[in-house]
Image (cartoon, helix red, strand yellow):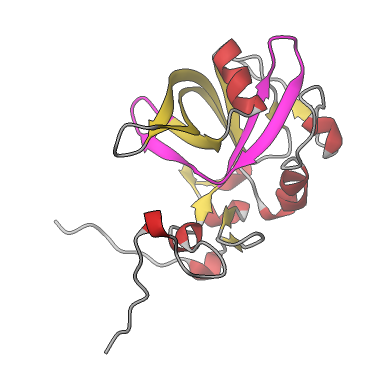
Amino acid sequence: MTEWHSYEPINGHRLPHDPLNAIVAPRPIGWVSTVSADGVANLAPYSFFNLFNYTPPIIGFSSMGWKDSVANIEATGEFVWNLVTRDLGEAMNATSASVPADVDEFALAGLEMAASTKVKPARVAASRAQFECKLTQLIRLETKEGKELDQWLVLGEAVAIHIDSAMLEDGVYQTARANPILRGGGPADYFAITEDSLFKMRRPG
């Protein structure tokens, strides 16, 4: 018989570490590049990130606090999402450092920039896929009582998508070939997507 550890979040989880982001995991990483109104490049990872619509393609990330990425996107209306793969994991982690707004995280992490085609923020040149995005909505999250949180949901429409052709086979993108990494729970857990973890299930008729 299953024994449950149950709790009401408002009263605390009674565990050494909040299990929430370990349960809803692993999650794709929102590695977001922006540029400030003054032209300073910024690059930061967000673990609350996903794809929300096919046509048009809309992706989004949520920021705990009004961080440089959110401020830049509000000011310019543009950002780029860069796919994080295992070979870029350490560089991605370096860009998570809390540094002043005038610090260029591309330079900090030793990453080469690639020019975008539809937006001003640069792409991570070594990333296997990038989405150039235009802001569609910037939403402040609220509690069930309507209390505003210092949590900001950024949604953007991808207006240009770049894919390393080596990731395609007969025109089909091979997810595991890029060896993407995903965010787990706790302060340091990540997971890699590899070919040996692939299995297939087709949707019923």
Q: Indicate left or right for 108 with 9 as reference.
A: right
Q: Whole-percent x and y of residue 171?
A: 47, 41
Does residue 170 appear anywhere in the picture? no
User: Is 130 on the left or on the right of 108, as rendered?
Assistant: left
Residue in front for this viewpoint, 118 or 183: 183
Q: Overall secondary structure of the magenta stretch?
A: strand
- In the displayed image of the protein, which residue is found farthest to the front? 11
Numbered disc total:
0
Q: Compare residues 146 and 183 and report the one nearer the observer.
A: 146
* Figure check: 142 above or below 20: above
Q: Nearer the viewer, residue 178 or 86?
A: 86
The quadrant of the picture occupied by the C terminus is bottom left
Residue visible at 65% across and 23% down? 34
Q: Bounds of the magenta span? A: 29-58
* 102 up-or-down from 163: above or below: above
Q: Residue at x 48, y 64 (%)?
A: 19
- Residue placed at 73% from the left, 39% from the top? 126
**Res. 196 visible in picture:** yes
Q: Position of residue 16 (x, y in %)?
A: 57, 70
Residue at the bottom extreme of this rendering: 1
Quadrant hosting residue 124: top right
| Residue at image location 73% in from the left, 33% down from the top | 125
Quarter of the picture containing the N terminus is bottom left
